[in-house]
Amino acid sequence: MPDLVLLSTGGTIATTSTEAGRVVGVDAKTLLRSAEGHWDSGAVRVRALDVKRLVSFAATTEDVLDLARAVRAASAEADGIVVTHGTDSMEEAAFLVSLTHEGEVPVVFTGAQRPFDDTAPDGPRNLASALRWAASSEARGTGVSVVFDDKVLPVVGVRKVHTLALSAFAAPGRGPIATVDEAGVRLHARPSVAPALLSLDVERLPRVDVIGQYLGADAVALEAALACGARGLVVAGFGAGNTAPDVTEACLALLDEGFPVAVASRVGSGAVLGLYSGGGADLLRAGAIPAGDLSPWQTRLLLAAALTRTAGQDGPGTVETCRRWLEQVGAVAR
């Protein structure tokens, strides 16, 4: 009989409605009981633990590093781990945990779009699906994944794609790796497992800022990030990774000094390529890191993790660490 650990961190799945808005108040054991009618709970042993009780937009990277340590501890005694988490920052939290996770034990994130006390909550079914996936032999060795609306999504490239719909998450360009529903657990593809890059001895990530691109953008946000101590930058570029002229010029100056700059896209899917002179072509030629299909927010965490491994080295060491990682997960061409 598989042994699972359920780690609850709060989020909408654990909220109830009040006059002031939704508040977290439902504990892990209550969440587990709510899922019992949606799966054969007698076939699996589950230990339910509360790690945090937060709405995920209030979480910090330090909170997620604490969660990663709880995942590491649970991995020593469990066949699978399920994490209930708020959807607002789930794609980032799951990705950051994946950068610390090693071994064959699957780690599965899930949550809800509707609160616990909704007349038709989606949390119980999502949780049951996550538990079924974590307990299955197919999940072994798949690293960290996100289960939502019957779909199992790879952590690399996963995004929240709708503010309210029950089918809130997707991994554009990668698709679901499995389905969990009344027909059972069906594996469609083996995901590219994110290699561990971050030590859990790290207490705080280096500052990396995301610089958004928009019509008429200048370099003010970039300069402010540097003034606040940023050790790396991610540009959320137009299209396939283009930047406004002032931003291009500022990034080229930083790259010339060996400062790490990554280029992601503000578009919801597709690769980053150096196609246009004056924009992405200039940046990638100068050594910027193309983030592939990672969102700007996941790219930020990758760059921060790489910086912890190359402390005391030059910028090229950080860049090479990111490039090698991105190649390993199929985010960029080898």
Image: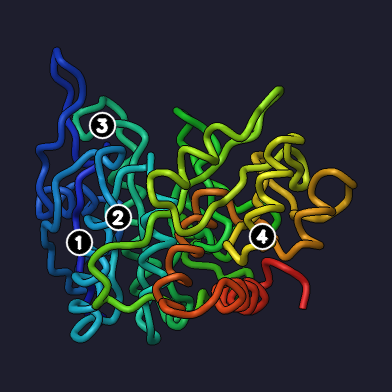
Instruction: Name the side, left or right, on which 120 lies relative to 29.
Output: right
Label whose residue precedes the other's in the sequence (1 or 4): 1
Camera-side residue: 304 or 120? 304
Instruction: Report which residue position mark 2 lands on.
Output: 61
| Between marks 1 and 4 in the image, the one whose residue lies nearer the viewer | 4
Q: CA distance from mark 3 to mark 1?
A: 18 Å
How packed is label 3: few (under 14 Cα within 10 Å), some, or many (20 or more)?
many
- Which label sits on residue 255? 4
Separation (CA) of disc 1 from disc 2: 17 Å
- N-terminal-most mark, 2 or 4: 2
Q: Secondary structure at mark 2?
A: helix
Q: Amino acid at mark 2?
A: Thr
Q: Whole-Å distance between the Cαs marked 2 and 4? A: 26 Å
Q: Are marks 3 and 1 in contact (CB under 8 Å)?
A: no
For disc 3, the marked residue is 115
Going from the N terminus, do you reach mark 1 or mark 2 first?
A: 1
| Amino acid at pointer 1 | Leu
Q: Disc 3 versus disc 4: distance between alpha carbons?
A: 46 Å
Tag nearer the camera, 1 or 2:
2
Instruction: Between label 3 and label 1, give the one nearer the viewer.
Output: 1
Q: For residue 27, say whether it is visible.
A: yes
- Label 1 to label 4: alpha-carbon separation: 41 Å
Q: Amino acid at mark 4?
A: Leu
Question: In the displayed structure, would residue 327 be above or below residue 234?
Answer: below
Which mark is on residue 7? 1
Nearest the viewer among 290 and 316 is 316
